[in-house]
Amino acid sequence: MYHQLTSQQRYTIFVLRQKNVAIKDIADTIGVHYSTVYRELKRNKGTHHYHYGIAQHKCDERKHRMRKHRKFSIDMRKRIVSLLVCEQWSPEQIKGWMERNGEKCVSVETIYQYIRFDRKCGGELYKHCRHRLKNIRRTAETAHTAIKDRVMIEQREEEADGTRFGDFEMDTIIGKDGKGAIVTIVERSRDFFMMRKLRHGKNAKQLAKTVVAMMTPYIGRIKSITTDNGSEFAEHKYIAERLKTKIFFTHPYSSWEKGNIENTNKLIRQYIPKGTDFKHISEEQIKRIQHKINRRPRKKLNFSTPTAEFFKKNNITLHLLLESTVTIFCAFLK
């Protein structure tokens, strides 16, 4: 458990620093982790150097100022850090999920402030945030390829606005140097997504077979599939016929027309960054990433999870569905 430094420990730090003792050796002497000493020296030093009296005064003053706002307890902090590090949930997801389950939680901004403070002190909590506290630049989509007999998005039913169940979006993620690919599919109303590694890269026929294998368990509930103009979707008629659905295409350079899958791909990039060689990505890793993201609570679902809401709507057990999906998927690849 975390304990604040005592005045005696601060005095020891002051004396040993005067003798130019290394930070790690100071930490061993007072029985704390070296990062604790590092933060102490950085946070409580005086104008020019560290002095135990000034450090203790700063600490006492801070305690007095924050006494009325001690909601961010040690136990709460541990809980939040656990969800951030182990599940890679965003601060908003953490707060929403904790409150949904009857747990007290500080504000989203307070969580972000704690992450920023940890980073400033040399910590690595920020690396578990989706964008590592950085703004991501948007890039234009790659040039489209004309696809025969495509149906554009304006012909899609008005009901396919993301509120009804059964409207899907589809896309691909490309590996290092344009080699290797992963197909991703998301159900818009519940944010439940599926992903599979494509053995033959962006080959249109193999992608079509893979998509059919992934979605066969849902035939009869697939209202529509929306995708972009990538050449890998050239076999869209095969997919539509096998899945008994309709496929619509967005306009070139209009990624917002399939914003749900674009956002989902960004979530995946937290685990598979751009520039990753897909040769080193196993099917087991793909499954783990899919399950982990589908377990994240979502604000649009009142902080329930895509997995819970998707299978509640389908009225089918997760175990049976996964078993049937894997069986069908293997059969199509033979």
Image: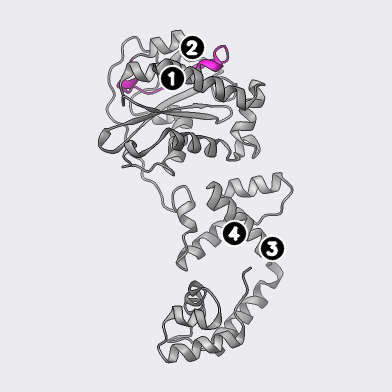
The answer to which of marks 3 and 1 sits earlier in the sequence is 3
Q: Which mark is residue 137?
A: none
* Label 4 to label 3: alpha-carbon separation: 10 Å
> Are dots 1 and 2 in contact, CB under 8 Å?
yes
Q: Position of residue 206 (x, y in %)?
A: 35, 18
> What residue span does the magenta drawing correspond to?
216-234
Quarter of the image with the C terminus is top left
Please name the residue that numbered disc 2 is placed on. Answer: 243
Give me the C-alpha separation between circle 1 and circle 2.
9 Å
Label pair 4/3, CB-CB below 8 angstroms: no
Q: Amino acid at mark 2?
A: Leu
Element type where label 1 sits in the image:
helix
Q: Which mark is residue 211?
A: 1
Sequence-wise first label, 4 or 2: 4
- Image: 38 above or below 333: below
Residue 101, visible in the rendered structure: yes
Tag 1 near tag 4, CB within 8 Å: no
Q: Nearer the viewer, mark 1 or mark 4?
A: 1
Q: Amino acid at mark 1?
A: Val
- Which amino acid is tagged 4? Thr
Identified at 40% across, 41% down, the residue is: 272
Q: Which mark is residue 71?
A: 3
Quadrant containing the N terminus is bottom right
- Residue 317 drawn at (x, y percent): 65, 24
In front: mark 4 or mark 2? 2
Three-letter residue code for mark 3 = Lys
Q: Looking at the image, which residue is at 67% across and 77% down?
A: 64
N-term-proximal mark, 2 vs 3: 3
